[in-house]
Image: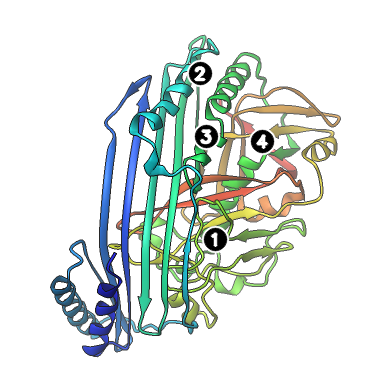
Amino acid sequence: MDYDLAEFAVSHAIKLGADYADARLENTTANDFILKNGIPQMSSFDKVNGLGVRVQSGGCFGFASTNEPEKEKIKDMVEKAMKMTKAACRIAQHSQMSEAPAENAQYEVKQKTKLDDLSPKEKLNVLFEIEKSIASTKVDAPGRFFSLSDFCTEKYFTNSEGTKITSKIPRVDFWHFITINNNGKTAQRYWQYGDSGGFEKITARNFPEVLKNEVIKMDENMKKGVKPPKGKIDVVVGPQISAIMVHESVGHPYEADRILGREAAQAGETFITQEMLNTKIGSNAVNIYDDPTIEGSFGYYLYDDDGVKATRRHLIKNGMINEFLHNRYTAAEMGTKSNAAARATGFDREAIVRMANTYVGKGDHTEEELIEGVKEGVFIRNFTEWNIDDKRLNAKYTGAESYTIKNGRLGEPVITPIIEISTPALWSAVDATAKNMEYHSGTCGKAEPMQAIPVWFGGPSMRIRNIRLGNEK
């Protein structure tokens, strides 16, 4: 990449009268493979590069991009961006950016097995091995969809305040959707796994064995499952349930642009308000974080797309709302500093407030101890579906592999137990967390045009006291 092109874009904007300017020069390569019911589908091999420029003039901001990173093209783009920004200032609301120190850094995620060193055939063979492993179970699985992707982004960010950051982050991503059949009844499971690093991250997870066991458990649940107990009971949920709960009911509603009312039409609203900062929303056992700096994570970065140094954010502290996710815009509006939550999916998208790796903090218990503390209840290891309302207030989580708990011991399988609960009621009912931390991955959607960005969400097993379960009719 020619870093001078980004420097030229910033200097030309300042020359034209911009109060502030930054530029992101990016180069991304991506490979995608799909196996559907044992048959390879069309693969894709992409290379994308371009430059995005953001300018501030007269208290208004503008953004423009080009996939032709050439000096004359960039010059024209910057000039048009300045004209549009100045014109918009006549009718637009003025805004500022919070202060941030100038940063100079260079970082790269290392690969033990480089993505470029493997042939398409070697990558696709991973999916064939999964297919063979599921076939060995003899379970009737008429629907099998597997997707394997790898992508690497090189980025250079610079701004008129003196920040200069280069980064290179390779990522791998596996996604599956399985349907099984048993005596005319069907069950489905889908999940995603993603990491930053080389292909060693894929092989280390041993997907043939993971999905083989998943299919066996699905089949067992369909054959032997009973309905969940009625009335209010205690529930222990596994790390995968904790993960989806924290992402949907804490991560999204704590994005400051939603709190300011800027995402309602694109990705939903939030029930959280600025006035709720430092108020109680959960039990003392609840600590929730978002941390981009976790090595090997799918949402990993050390500097955000505002050029701010990343740090761990403590969103809920001992049940109290402690912090929101901010970029430099929202931080200025709320009178605080950015905590480096500005992310964009590509050079042609403006950076907005996003999660990175959101998780429930671990406790001191084992999962077995949480279960032993339940007289009558249900243990839900993973889920088959979820949904949540636009304000992220009322949610539903439908369990997949689940078991009864009687006198502190696991019993028979339970068919699709359903948790329907409000966000404050959920986190207020958590009385203990375990220490069996797990991180799961997703491609989180937000904004218009859509920005689907890599994230982790995670946590340990949790015990939720005195809630009511439903089940599918």
The amino acid sitting under disc 3 is Thr
Instruction: Please say if 32 is above or below 209.
Output: below
Q: Which secondary structure lies at badge 3?
A: helix
**Label 4–label 3 contact, CB within 8 A:** no
Which quarter of the rendered picture does the N terminus lie within?
Answer: bottom left
The amino acid sitting under disc 2 is Ile
Q: Which mark is residue 311?
A: none
The residue singled out by tag 1 in the image is: 292
Q: Which secondary structure lies at badge 2?
A: helix
Calculate the distance from the C-alpha at mark 1 to the C-alpha at mark 3.
Answer: 24 Å
User: Where does the image place residue 110, in percent across and percent down from the top left?
Assistant: 50, 53
**Label 1–label 3 contact, CB within 8 A:** no
The amino acid sitting under disc 1 is Pro
Front: mark 1 or 3: 3
The amino acid sitting under disc 4 is Leu
Q: Which secondary structure lies at badge 4?
A: strand
The residue singled out by tag 3 in the image is: 203
Q: Which mark is residue 134?
A: 2
